[in-house]
Image (cartoon, rainbow, N blue to C red):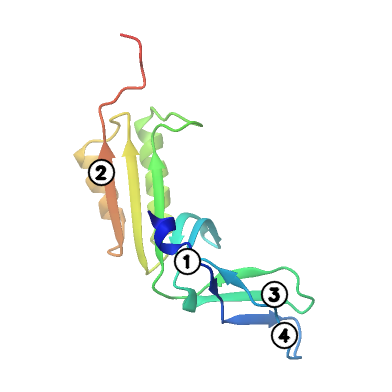
């Protein structure tokens, strides 16, 4: 759904060439608003919808070492957690809680709108623990905690 809405290519107008005082011309740089695994100094963001007017493209004077710099803007950051994935199956309540708390701590470093979406397939946390996690989050972070009783055990 997000790709359908934010997949179009957009030109980045804010370009910075560092390492020289000479005016350098840079090729047109385009990107889309939606990024997955966006690398920021505070860590990776699972999904980010970027306000491209608040993005700077930086490159050195030889046209190498390019990178995006995310400035203050109307960006949306989304972190996603699942207790059961193809790579892991989390059964420890403490481990699950600390993974979510760690992502909330990362999101707390930002002032833009953030979402934390948690899929608990193992019924690990109760209302008290989920409330405790919500209390850790700043006001700009909305937490969605979804539980299901679907079991990972297919043997009766």
Q: Which mark is residue 25?
A: 4
Which of disc 2 and disc 1 is earlier in sequence? 1
Q: Quadrant of residue 78?
A: bottom left
Image position of 59 (left or right of 145): right
Which of disc 4 and disc 3 is earlier in sequence? 4
Q: Which mark is residue 130?
A: 2
How many other residues sit within 10 Å of disc 3, few (<14), some (14-19) or many (≥20)? Answer: some
Look at discs 3 and 4 and give the one toward the viewer. Answer: 4
Is the Cβ of the residue at disc 3 closer than 8 Å to that at disc 4? no
Q: Estimate the spatial distance between the alpha carbons at disc 1 and disc 3, rounded to whole Å.
A: 20 Å
Look at discs 2 and 4 and give the one toward the viewer. Answer: 4
Secondary structure beneath label 1:
loop
Q: Which mark is residue 59?
A: 3
Which of disc 3 and disc 1 is earlier in sequence? 1
How many other residues sit within 10 Å of disc 4, few (<14), some (14-19) or many (≥20)? Answer: few
Secondary structure beneath label 2:
helix
Q: Estimate the spatial distance between the alpha carbons at disc 2 and disc 4, rounded to whole Å.
A: 51 Å
Q: Is residue 30 above or below residue 141?
A: below
Q: Is residue 36 above or below residue 19?
A: above
Secondary structure beneath label 3:
strand
* Residue shown at the point (26%, 52%) measured from the top left: 134
How many other residues sit within 10 Å of disc 2, few (<14), some (14-19) or many (≥20)? Answer: some
Which of disc 4 and disc 1 is earlier in sequence? 4
Instruction: Find disc 1 in the rendering and name its residue.
Output: 33
Is the Cβ of the residue at disc 3 closer than 8 Å to that at disc 2? no
Residue furthest out toward the bottom: 22
Q: Position of residue 29 (x, y in %)?
A: 63, 74
Q: Estimate the spatial distance between the alpha carbons at disc 3 and disc 2, rounded to whole Å.
A: 43 Å
Secondary structure beneath label 4:
loop
* Residue shown at the point (48%, 31%) measured from the top left: 86
């Amino acid at each position: 759904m997000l790709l359908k809405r934010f997949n179009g290519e957009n030109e980045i107008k804010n370009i910075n060439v560092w390492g020289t005082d000479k005016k350098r011309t840079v090729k047109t740089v385009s990107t889309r608003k939606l990024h997955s695994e966006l690398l920021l100094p505070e860590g990776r963001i699972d999904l980010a919808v970027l306000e491209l007017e608040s993005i700077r493209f930086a490159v050195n004077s030889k046209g190498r070492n390019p990178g995006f710099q995310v400035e203050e803007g109307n960006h949306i950051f989304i972190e996603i957690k699942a207790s059961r994935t193809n790579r892991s199956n989390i059964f420890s309540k403490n481990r699950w809680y600390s993974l979510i708390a760690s992502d909330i701590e990362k999101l707390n470093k930002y002032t833009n709108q953030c979402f934390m979406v948690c899929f608990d397939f193992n019924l690990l946390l109760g209302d008290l623990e989920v409330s405790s996690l919500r209390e850790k989050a700043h006001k700009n972070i909305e937490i969605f905690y979804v539980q299901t009783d679907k079991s990972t055990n297919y043997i009766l």
